[in-house]
Image (cartoon, rainbow, N blue to C red):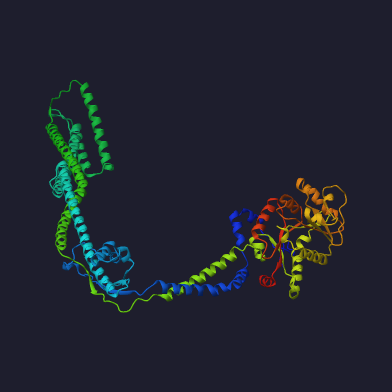
Amino acid sequence: MILSDNGQPGLAPVSQDRETSEPAIIRFTRLFKRDLWCWVNALQKLWWLFAIFPLLFAVIFFFFRTMTTSSVFVANCGLIRQEVTDNRSGVLPPGYVHVQKSIIVNLFKSRAVLEETVKRLSLPYTAEQLFNNIEVKSEKNSDYYIVSAMSKDPTIAATLANTLSDVFIDEYKKLIRKNLEDLNDSYVRTQNEMEKQQVELNEKLKDLSAENNLTTIDSDIAFNNQRLLYIEDQLAKMSSTLDSSRQALYELQGELANTEEEIVSLREKSTAAEDELTRAQSTLNSYEQIYAPHNPILIQQRQFVKQLKDALEKAQEEEDVDSDVNSKVVISRNPAYTQLLVSIASKKAEITALTNDIKLNNDMAVQLRARRELLSKLQPSIRQIEADLAQNKEQINRTKVQIVTIRNFLDRSFSDISIQELAKAPTVPLGRKRGVWTAVGFMLGAFIASLILFGSEIFNLTVRSNVDVEDALRIKSLGMIPVLEQAHRANYYSALQTMVSNGESYFSKGSGDGGSMLIVFAPNKRADMDEKAREEFCETLKIRMGWKYVIVSPLTEEEFNSKQTPLLINDYLYQFTDEAPKPGKDRTVYFRLDDLSFISPPTDEQIKRIKTAYKSTQVIVWDLFDFELHRQLYAEIARNADLTIIPMKYAQTSKLTIFRNLQFLKSFHVKDIVGLLYQVNNKHYSKVTL
């Protein structure tokens, strides 16, 4: 038993959202889904095709091959290709490439070979006809070729194979010669291009040498580096000498500042204070040579000398005031001072000369460094040009040798393929392969039988199982009812019970408004409706659920005229009367599909009145008319129903018509649509319900 959406026993839901989101072509292709047993039944039904067609076609192909073919003789000529393994022996020229095996096989049956063979033998047919009588075989890793010629005359077959092989060898030699000539032309073009490139490289090298005043790049680099090293060494020496001269000049200038320009050369009066000052200064000079500048002894001696100088200056001032003291002093230029001036002038001249020399050498060093950088930049280009020149020269010489070798080889007639075994006239004709044709006919017959079986089944779009209802049409299956037969009555009533059980989830809901539950049987055609099965379903529903039911059956104009005073519900439906007709013993009332129903179809409110018309019953079963008679009214009634059942007859109702019906109902938002399959063959029923 299948569970419904609310967990109660019932029907498995089918996703409507997924179906509406799928493209129409996918929904249509699902109609071709079917149960596996449908294929089995089709095979059991058409098994005779597989028993007759393969044998029939096998016999036809056997006699066709026998009647349309005659005795054919085949002669074989063997050719072998001898690979030359040592090219250094001079047998083959440099650059020679062996012809590929595929080209050799194609050359056997080329137009040139075939036409020349026809011409030599004066054959009464064209090269195209000869092409069909020639076959060339060679194994994948073998250099042995077998040329097979077919003819009704064994002598002609042997002559044809031998002549074709001779013609092939001649064409093969021409092919080798043509390849060598192309190779020679390629070498000549290469030589001309390399000689032209050699001239261009020489001109480029000359232009670079003239532009940059070069002899050879290596000698220029060595000479420039040697000069630069000498200049840098001289600059280092001059810089050292200049630093020494500047230091000596600094010392001389300091000594000059401490030397008096004039000295007293004669003094007749000498005081004891001056003598003492002279001795103190002499002692200070000796201390300065011995002690550090901050030595306390040296500092004390300096202070003592300063005191003596101050005292001597004060005494001299007093002597100037005392006019009665006479003294004689003679002042002259200090020779030491003069000598220092001469030394300073000499050092300055020396420094000036060194500075000028350093500047000149620096300028020369800058030029040499710039030259060195230029040569460094030019060196790779010049080296590359020289290497290209040497390489081109070597290649030109090698190419010249190769051209000479090829030209010498062209004077010979070379071929590495030769005839190993001439063809002989055969004595036994070729088999007709009637067994192969018989097998092909047998397989073709089996294929056609399979094609007929597949076509008859794949295009059979009738409903035959729950797979057709649920997987192909994508609606829920309420059940499958087999044909009522005495031997299978249990299956029939069990199917009715199962149908009621599967619909319990819908029956338990009811209408929900206090009225009766409206169940609509919506067949595509009235022929799809099995009224007996519908009555049995209502009776089973009455027994299982304890519900009373009323059946609303449609009437056309012809059916209305043939019945005597039928119980019509039309007046109540169109509100011409307030009471609905009471059903008779058969629990049936009728709805007449008259002109009024086409002009003014009942509204939703009018259809819903039927649910409250029969309060003493729990279920109203409405059998609808043909879908094509009034589509809109058909969909309106189904839209207001609590459950819409689409009945289908086994192997008669088309899935395509039901598919169109469903698409129309879904456009009216009809929900709770289920399918019901009637009159299922009992053998088929027992298989698809396993």
Res. 686 image quadrant? bottom right
Outermost bottom residue:
427
Is 105 placed left or right of 269 in the picture? right
Q: Which part of the image, by quadrant, shows the N terminus?
A: bottom right
Q: Which part of the image, by quadrant, shows the C terminus?
A: bottom right
Looking at the image, residue 108 lies above or below residue 203: below
Residue 402 at least partly seen: yes
Where does residue 468 sit, x and y in percent of width and height? 65, 63
Tell me the residue at 61%/60% (across/down). 30
Looking at the image, residue 278 lies above or below residue 443: above
Number of numbered discs on residues: 0
Is 506 placed left or right of 564 in the picture? left
Is 460 placed left or right of 136 in the picture? right
Where does residue 523 sit, x and y in percent of width and height? 72, 58
Where does residue 385 sit, x and y in percent of width and height? 19, 50
Viewer-proximal residue, 477 or 146?
Answer: 146
Looking at the image, residue 490 lies above or below residue 630: below
Where does residue 513 sit, x and y in percent of width and height? 82, 53
Viewer-proximal residue, 240 or 183?
Answer: 183
Res. 662 image quadrant? bottom right
Viewer-proximal residue, 309 or 497?
Answer: 497
Residue 602 at least partly seen: no
Tell me the residue at 25%/30% (across/down). 310
Res. 585 image quadrant? bottom right
